[in-house]
Image (cartoon, helix red, strand yellow):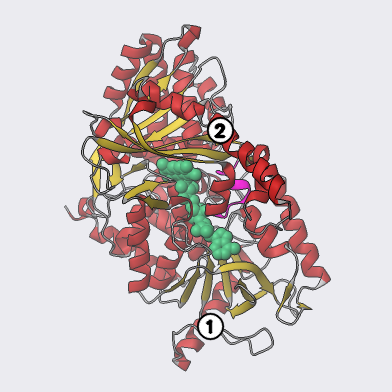
Amino acid sequence: MAFICSGMYAPVMGFHRDFMLTRNFNEFHTQKRRNDRSRSMHSVSMNSSKDSSYDVIIIGAGIGGLCTACLLSKYDKRVLLLESHSVAGGVAHGFDRNGIHFETGPSFYCGLEPDYEYRSLNPLKMILEISNAQLPCVSYDAFTFHFGNHNNTQTTKAVKIKGDADEYLNSIRSTFGKDAEHDMNAFILYMKDIFRAMENVPLMGLELSLRGLIRIFKYSAVSMLNLLPYVMDINAKLGDVLKKLNVLNRDCIRVIDLECFLLSGMLSDRTLTAEIAFMVGERSKRPLQFPVGGSRQIIQALLDAFRASGGTVQFNSHVDQIVLDKSDTQCARGVSVKHKNRSEFIAAPIIISNATLWDTAGALLSGNPRKVEGNSSFISADSRKVSEKYFADAQKIDVIPSFMHLHATFEADGLDESDGHHALVIDCEKSIEEAGNTVMVSISSVWDDSFGVPKGQHVVHAYTLEKYEDWERFEVLYKQFGADSKQISVEEKKTLRQEYELKKENRSLSLIKAMKMIIGDDFEDRISMKFIASPLTHARYTRRWKGTYGAAIVPPNKFPTPSTPFKNVYRVGDSVMPGIGVPAAAASAFLCVNQLVDENLIEESIQTHWNKLKEFRT
Ligand SMILES: Cc1cc2nc3c(=O)[nH]c(=O)nc-3n(C[C@H](O)[C@H](O)[C@H](O)COP(=O)(O)OP(=O)(O)OC[C@H]3O[C@@H](n4cnc5c(N)ncnc54)[C@H](O)[C@@H]3O)c2cc1C
């Protein structure tokens, strides 16, 4: 994806250090194997030897952490996955009430089923395939964009978004006319040209280093040359490319803006072209898919694969800090896991954080207090300076806001597979980015009946961006992870809770309105169960800094890499790869893991995968 474009052509920084680390890691690993040590969980205290039962500790079992864990275990590393929550999945988790399953995160997927039928650029599909995971999916062919108060006429225009370019263009023409179709055609053709040039690059071989560059050239020299004419555009803001393509039609641009917003949380004037080319290209070739049982099944498939290859997962294990080495100020020794009345130190030579950039740089690396066991401080003044600068730099990166969520079951007949996904702009006279004006809707029960809803009913997850800052004053009602709990009186708490509940109702009105636009004005009468979640709920359950959707990185700025200022501390997840979302989180695993394993293992993995793909066999 964007790394293919930006990282490959940008000066490759810091690769020497990565080589050294790879070597050290492998030496360490070989030594461990020689010693034939037990794989069981074994914690050591801060003052004992540097020995460890694990080669790698991964902090967080989100999609990024799980994919990284699967790859490393596959490469025979001994991995401990520590998850703060009682369940895995991070953003991609859900909850059950009265026998019904509610999803709280992703639901838009493309080319996902690990069936080796074709080569998709979806990195999650690749990881599921090489992990021998099973994930049956339902394919469907369209979702719907709704544009309310179109041209200030109080009417709503709806357009079916399809992968097939001709059908998509027909849909645009019948809703917005020929000019919109003409401009959309120019856009789609160009995105597909870029995609064609990108699609033969082996995503599995991604690595930000000279050896990574050589590997990519080895497997796809022709593709790399084909990419050359597009390098500038791939790394540019899509808005600039649209100007170059003379895409001027307002309706067409609004549709493209909405596509961008769904992916990056920003409009075309700030979104990286590569992300959109990837999405348009992939969607034109591969089916839209929904995993049977929902996103929880992706998580289960990854967990099963990880455990099957010998990995260890520990839930309810909140890492409160990455413990830095006293003697080597640029190195970590392990992590400290928070228990009720104590902290447990677990050592490992490599630490990978799946927490967001801000949580990693902040709470995990420069958070206070820097004390574990017996109140002695283990951070030197130099390390503190480095970690504080890392956090200060991270804070200069803008964050996409958090979310309001509506979860409900409702009565409805006759919905089919193409009624599952919607994105609605409530009022076209306002910005798509305005909080509450754009709503994403997923009605998962149209794809399969495993969500527990009775016949004639459906389950919906509707969500819209909402600033965390507007809810901060309610933090005292719940202890947010990593936050100090403030004390307030029972009376104050009661009043504040009433205000909070009222605010939740008010701020969820746009979600209800969106559902009325889809189902009808009587939507509220059809509801049988309803839950509203605020940015505080979102942040609390996902353990994400201010409940953010991710990093708002505008070209020519680049996404931060998996490396950190500490030589054995890495990051994975959606603030590592452009795109935000499941593909970005999964691809970050390749980017990180490839730095840590032998070249022959990576090559073997790429070869085996390619050989097994049906389209290469036939
Ligand atoms: C409402 C919503 C809808 C979305 N829809 C889509 C979609 O349809 N398609 C799509 O592709 N993407 C979608 N996305 C984006 C996508 O879900 C995320 O980008 C992706 O799941 C993030 O994965 P991650 O691994 O980067 O991080 P996370 O999911 O945030 O996982 C991080 C994990 O680390 C754990 N953790 C954090 N700190 C600690 C700690 N100190 N100790 C231990 N564990 C810790 C967390 O509990 C969590 O499990 C959506 C996001 C949201 C919020």
Q: Which is more toward the observer, 404 or 197? A: 404
Amino acid type, callout 2: Met
Q: Are marks 2 and 1 in contact (CB under 8 Å)?
A: no
Looking at the rendered structure, the secondary structure element under dot 1 is: helix
In the rendered image, the residue lying farthest to the front is: 491
Q: Is residue 398 visible?
A: no
Q: Whole-percent x and y of residue 426? A: 48, 21
Crowd rating for badge 2 (residues with CA inside 10 Å; few <14, some 14–19, many 20+):
many
Where 252 sits versus 104, above or below?
above
Q: Residues within 10 Å of mark 1 (few under 14, many from 20)?
A: few
Nearest to the observer: residue 394 or residue 156: 156
Q: Amino acid at mark 1?
A: Glu
- Beta carbon at label 1 within 8 Å of ligand 1: no
Residue 27, numbered circle: 1
**Residue at horizontal 44 percent and vertical 84 percent from the top:** 39
Disc 2 to disc 1, C-alpha distance: 44 Å
Residue 543 is one of the magenta-drawn residues: yes
Asked if residue 397 lies left or right of residue 68, the reply is: right
* Label 2: which secondary element: loop
Residue 149 image point, x, y percent = 47, 12
The x and y percentages for residue 602 are 41, 66
- Label 2 sits on residue: 266
For residue 282, which quarter of the picture?
top left
Indicate yes or no whether the magenta region holds residue 404: no
Q: Is residue 268 left or right of residue 516?
A: right
Please tell me the numbered disc located at residue 198: none
- Residue farthest left in this picture: 618
- Can you tell which quarter of the image residue 36 is in? bottom left
Residue 112, visible in the rendered structure:
yes
Dot 2 or dot 1, earlier in sequence: 1
Q: Pinpoint residue 297: horizontal percent, then vertical percent.
A: 32, 55
Which stretch did the figure color magenta?
542-551
